[in-house]
Structures are given as C-alpha cells and as structure tokens.
Image (cartoon, rainbow, N blue to C red):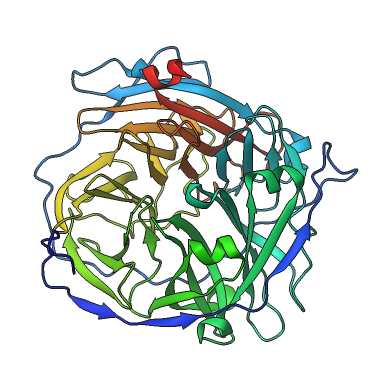
C-alpha cells in the first residue's frame, strides 16, 4: 500500500474475482408527461431473512452528542432544529428548492415504502422510487413519469420489482440507473444497470447491462438491497445474495455480501468488465461516497465494531480492518409510535445505510435502537467518524432527540468537504417526516420537513438518498417523502430537495 497511508496491519484479506457481464443493449424509453389512465398498484415486498449483528463488548462514548432542539412554530411542515448547545444560527442551512412529485411524476405508485433515490446534473434530474421512475428536464421543477416495469425488455422468466437507485458520474458525464427484477422459477434474478449521458437522458436513450449471480460465480442466488457509489475511476455496486431456504421468514436466507467495481473507462466505451469481492461472514456492504482512488466500505462486525474494507484501484484484492465504535443496540424492537399509535419503525434494521468520505475522514451511519453507550431514550442515528489515513475512530456522532426517533440515514459530501445527511424523524407528538442535516467539524444544522399523517400499517420505508448536486457542487440533492392527511393509507408524497449552506444557496 502507498507509504503516505499509515494503516495498521489488516484483520484479513478478501480476494477479488473477474466479472464480465453478458452483451449490453441500447434502448430508447418513453417519458410520459401525464399519468397513465389507471395508476399502478404497489404492495410491500416481503423482507428477507437477514443475520443478527453479534453482541460486542461494551465500549463507551467519551464525547456524547447533544440532543436536537426544535425551534419555530409547531404547525408548518418545514421545521428547523439545531444543536442544544450554543452555536451558529440554524438558518445557516437553507433549502434552495423543494418540489413535491405529483401523480404525473409517480403515477400514484409512491407508496409508504418509497425508498427514493435521485441524481442531478445541469437541468436534468433523475428520480426513482420502489415502483416508479421520473425525469425532470427543467432543474427539478416538473417531472415526467417512467414506468420501470416496461422501460426495458423483461429478462426471461422475470418481472421488475422493486429496488432502484440513481447516481451521476461526473468524470464521464453519465447517469446510472439501477433496477432490480424478481426471481424466476429457479430462484435467481438480475439487477440491471442502465447508462446515459446527460444529453442522452434528455433524449431518452439508454444502454443497459445485466448482472446475475451466475455472472458473479454464484449461480441461482437472489440479489437484493443494491446500492451505488462513485470513486475516482470506478463505479462501485454493492448488493446482497440470498438463497432459497424452506421454513424461514420470506423463504430466502442471506448467503453473502457482494462488492462489484466497474472501470469508468469501460462504461464510457460501452464495454464493461470488472472485479468482485464477496463475504459470507458480514451482512450488507455500504460504500463511502466520493472515495477517490481507494474504496472504503463498512459492515457491522458486532454492536461495538465496524469492519471497514479498503480496495486500492491498482490492487487486485481488498483488505479489511476492525474499528471499535461506541456500543449500540439493535435488538429491542425499534419502537417509535406516531400520535395515532402506530410503530413507524416497523421495517427498520441495523444495516449500515450511509457512507461518505470528506477529505481524510470517513463517515458511516446506521439506525440504532434505544439504549446504547449513552442510554438514548429513543431510536437514533449513530455515525462513526473514522480517520481514513489510519482507520482509527475519531468520535461517534448521534442524531437523537429525547422524545422523537431518527432513522434511515443517507450521507454524501459536497465540494466544501461538508457532509449532507438525509433521514427520517418522527414519533412522540410528531408524525414521520423527511429531515436534512449539514455536518461539519463545528456545527450540525437540521431542517425537518414534517409529515401530516402517520403510516396506518406500521411501515415507513428503509432507504433515502442524498447526493452531491452537479454542477452546483457545494449543494446537495436529496430524495425523501411524507404521508399526508387524507391521502390514503399507502399514498406517499415524494419530494426532491436541494439544500446547502446559506451563502452557497444565495450565490447561485
């Protein structure tokens, strides 16, 4: 490894295998300016059986984070919150744009498990949810609907459902759209990557490549929980593989975690090959966004230890390191009731959901249950700040409130090396809503968009997104949603939000 990095000896090595997908295909898809005559129905997919995080030794948190405080009037959907301790005014964080996606954008398919994702460059914004996709060609003011089930030819014996993710690769001016398909009669499925330059997105011209477990040397496995990240010269895709198992919840049991890297040069040419690293010991890899020429990703080794992987672009294999973190809990049930008595955290689990690199600092975030090293009274978000040069923990950050739960964190870094966080907040006297945070070395400012309705079936998604905005790289683009009063039990309102520091918003 380069001498400029003072890394300790790794806990172990992970060998990489070569990957080459089947032939790619060019497709022209239709953008619909209005909703279809009948809205598509959407159910909630069954959860896969996932491993329990092992209990680790008790590790204290020597520098506890202060709780949030809510300020301003109680009624508006936009609420601002800042640190309980003295500091800069919370209005230092400003929303530059907020657009609610209507039925012309989502065709009524934005459900209570929405899992939205977004990517933006110039006037083009590409947005996905579990059962819909949408594109904006006017900087996110209006969106046109895309039916992900019919946009591309269906793989033999498979149909679309449901995970999707969107990202933008500035080095090669390319949007990437990930779609997941359901299993065929043998129990396997594919995840499809679609690529288009900014101009090609405007025209509806995409080319696709399919990834099946058989391409990865693991035939007849079901791929699920995918995510994307962009490095200096690589696109990274993580996913989990499940195998059929009779007599267990959902009928599928986790088999292994997968990290795939694809050179950007191959994506530019439309001729893609890459390498893959897997683990059958640790569930769910989460990449650090903006990782440069060395990839970092994390998974839970225990409730007081993260396993952090590193993978140099010019190295064949990855290494992993175990990093102690403050003890957290994941087995108490993640209970947080809305004012009308429903547990909006009924689908939460402790997967690492957010990761990013800001300068030489890594941030990894997950949903923790009440308790932990600081005996938090409500479920909360725990973030590990790690020195990327030596993989030593710098400190633990908690986004927490004594009366309200926080969960489902997503992270990204802007050109200022500040970290944007998109997550959900709710419980107590508040219905669940979408919240935004700006994390720096000195401050944490929050703007929470408060929903007007709680979920009536104890479900509230499990995935949000925040990305660096292009070309305004000091700003963030975020995807979230709320459930509104009188909108129906499952009808969510997805939103597209651009936010950042006040001076950066006012400069554009």
- Rendered view: 14 above or below 82: below
- Rendered view: 34 above or below 239: above
At 55% from the left and 78% from the top, the residue drawn is: 252
Query: Which quarter of the image is occupied by the N terminus?
Result: bottom left
At 21% from the left and 19% from the top, the residue drawn is: 87
Task: Decide which of 178, 447 is in the foreground and name it.
Answer: 178
Task: Decide which of 490, 93 is in the foreground and name it.
Answer: 93
For the question of whether residue 223 can be seen, the reply is yes
**Relative to 294, is 264 on the left or the right?**
right
Horizontal and vertical percent position of residue 62: 8, 44
| Residue at the outermost top position | 73
- Rendered view: 290 above or below 448: below
Image quadrant assignment for residue 476: top left
For the question of whether residue 301 can be seen, the reply is no
Horizontal and vertical percent position of residue 86: 18, 18
Horizontal and vertical percent position of residue 262: 48, 67
């Amino acid at each position: 490894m380069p001498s400029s990095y003072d890394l300790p000896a790794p806990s172990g090595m992970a060998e990489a295998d070569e990957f080459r997908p089947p032939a790619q295909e060019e497709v022209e898809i239709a953008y619909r300016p209005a909703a279809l005559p009948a809205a598509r129905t959407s159910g909630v997919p069954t959860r896969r059986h996932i491993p329990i995080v092992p209990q680790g030794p008790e590790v204290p948190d020597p520098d506890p984070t202060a709780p949030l405080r809510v300020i301003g009037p109680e009624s508006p959907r936009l609420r601002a919150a800042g640190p309980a301790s003295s500091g800069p005014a919370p209005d230092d964080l400003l929303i530059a744009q907020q657009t609610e996606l209507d039925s012309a954008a989502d065709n009524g398919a934005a459900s209570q498990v929405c899992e939205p994702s977004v990517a933006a460059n110039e006037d083009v914004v590409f947005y996905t949810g579990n059962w819909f996709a949408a594109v904006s060609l006017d900087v996110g003011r209006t969106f046109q609907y895309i039916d992900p089930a019919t946009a591309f030819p269906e793989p033999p014996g498979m149909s679309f459902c449901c995970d999707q993710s969107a990202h933008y690769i500035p080095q090669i001016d390319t949007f990437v759209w990930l779609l997941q398909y359901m299993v065929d009669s043998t129990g396997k499925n594919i995840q499809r990557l679609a690529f288009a330059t900014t101009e090609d997105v405007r025209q509806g011209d995409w080319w696709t490549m399919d990834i099946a477990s058989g391409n990865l040397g693991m035939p007849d496995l079901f791929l699920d929980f995918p995510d994307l990240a962009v490095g200096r010269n690589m696109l990274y895709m993580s996913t989990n593989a499940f195998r059929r198992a009779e007599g267990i919840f959902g009928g599928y049991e986790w088999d292994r975690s997968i990290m795939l890297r694809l050179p950007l040069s191959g994506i530019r040419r439309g001729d893609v090959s890459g390498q893959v690293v897997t683990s059958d010991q640790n569930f769910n890899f989460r990449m650090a966004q903006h990782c440069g020429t060395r990839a970092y990703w994390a998974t839970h080794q225990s409730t007081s230890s993260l396993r952090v992987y590193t993978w140099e672009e010019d190295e064949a294999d990855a290494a992993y390191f175990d990093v102690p973190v403050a003890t957290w809990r994941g087995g108490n049930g993640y209970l947080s009731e809305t004012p009308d008595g429903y547990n909006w955290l009924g689908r939460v689990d402790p997967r690492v959901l957010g990761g990013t690199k800001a300068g030489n600092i890594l941030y990894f975030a997950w949903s923790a249950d009440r308790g932990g090293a600081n005996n938090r009274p409500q479920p909360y978000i725990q973030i590990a700040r790690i020195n990327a040069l030596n993989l030593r923990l710098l400190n633990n950050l908690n986004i927490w409130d004594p009366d309200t739960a926080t969960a489902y964190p997503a992270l990204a870094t802007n050109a200022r090396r500040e970290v944007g966080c998109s997550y959900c907040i709710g419980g107590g006297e508040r219905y669940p809503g979408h919240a935004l945070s700006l994390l720096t070395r000195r401050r944490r400012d929050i703007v929470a968009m408060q929903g007007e309705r709680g979920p009536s079936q104890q479900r509230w998604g499990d995935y949000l997104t925040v990305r660096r905005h292009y070309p305004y790289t000091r700003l963030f683009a975020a995807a979230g949603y709320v459930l509104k009063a009188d909108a129906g039990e499952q009808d969510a309102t997805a939103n597209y939000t651009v936010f950042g520091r006040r001076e950066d918003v006012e400069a554009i």
